[in-house]
């Protein structure tokens, strides 16, 4: 009887360890990962059908052990736009050669989801830098900027050696910097800041004095080419595999 209880306890500890490892793996936002982003603009009258189909696909991913698949919905601008994000090991996996469903079912699913979408983009990014998220985020504030020719290394060096140390000092967590590698201009860098509530948008990202702010950000405008794009997205847990 005692051996049975020990075995049950050991299994529980193993499951807890696996879950903790997965959480740490996810929350750390490790660098040097490839991330695919499917940006889908959904027809307003097909939103319910799109949601049901994405739930079905995420359930298939979980059953097939395909890994993490996160769905985010844009909250400002075109609120019928979704970003479906997944990790890949190499560029050869971009097309998703390992199916989550059998081929016949997949064909039916693709036909059905195609009827719900009015436009789509498919891009691949590489995670360059990150500050781990400490809590489960509900929203992400995204900034897309194009870096001037010849300034990518200098910009990322500024982020790593100047911005991140200051951010850590003031307790800022949950930030990522991804570089576009396929599907657009590879001088595009996307910065994401995870937040828990919409109210945090009105709060300063860093509580710096005016002198500290000038010292940190002086000259950084020279890194960028043209105007940037900024938007906020909400995590859609019911359409994703697991939770963040």
Image (spheres, grey):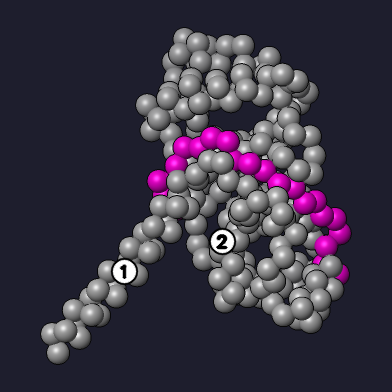
Label 1 SS: helix
Residue range (magenta): 115-136
Q: Quadrant of residue 183?
A: top right
Residue at point 42%, 25% (across, down): 165
Query: How many numbered circles does the render carry?
Result: 2
Residue 240 percent location from the top left of the image = 59, 64
200 over 105 or under it: above or below: above
Answer whether residue 21 is visible to the viewer in this image: yes
Residue holding disc 1 = 14
Q: CA distance from mark 2 to mark 1?
A: 20 Å
Residue at point 56%, 49% (across, down): 139
Q: Main secondary structure of the magenta part?
A: strand
**Label located before the other in sequence (2 or 1):** 1
Residue holding disc 2 = 68
131 over 100 or under it: above or below: above
Residue 111 percent location from the top left of the image = 84, 73
Residue 187 percent location from the top left of the image = 73, 30
């Amino acid at each position: 009887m005692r051996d049975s209880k020990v075995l049950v306890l050991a299994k529980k500890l193993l499951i807890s360890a696996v879950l903790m490892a997965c959480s740490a793996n996810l929350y750390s936002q490790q660098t040097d990962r490839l991330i695919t982003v499917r940006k889908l603009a959904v027809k307003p009258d097909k939103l319910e059908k799109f949601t049901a189909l994405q739930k079905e696909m995420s359930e298939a991913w979980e059953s097939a052990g395909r890994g993490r698949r996160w769905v985010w919905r844009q909250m400002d601008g075109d609120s019928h736009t979704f970003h479906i994000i997944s990790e890949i090991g190499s560029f050869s996996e971009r097309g998703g050669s390992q199916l989550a469903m059998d081929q016949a079912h997949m064909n039916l699913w693709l036909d059905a989801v195609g009827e719900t979408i009015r436009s789509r983009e498919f891009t691949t990014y590489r995670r360059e830098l990150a500050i781990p998220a400490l809590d489960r985020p509900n929203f992400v504030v995204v900034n897309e900027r194009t870096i001037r020719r010849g300034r990518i290394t200098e910009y990322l060096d500024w982020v790593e050696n100047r911005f991140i140390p200051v951010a850590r000092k003031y307790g800022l967590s949950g930030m990522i910097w991804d570089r576009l590698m396929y599907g657009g201009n590879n001088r595009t860098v996307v910065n994401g800041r995870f937040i828990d509530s919409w109210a945090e948008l009105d709060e300063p990202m860093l509580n710096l004095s005016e002198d500290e702010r000038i010292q940190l950000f002086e000259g950084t405008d020279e890194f960028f080419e043209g105007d940037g794009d900024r938007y906020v997205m909400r995590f859609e847990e019911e359409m994703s595999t697991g939770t963040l």
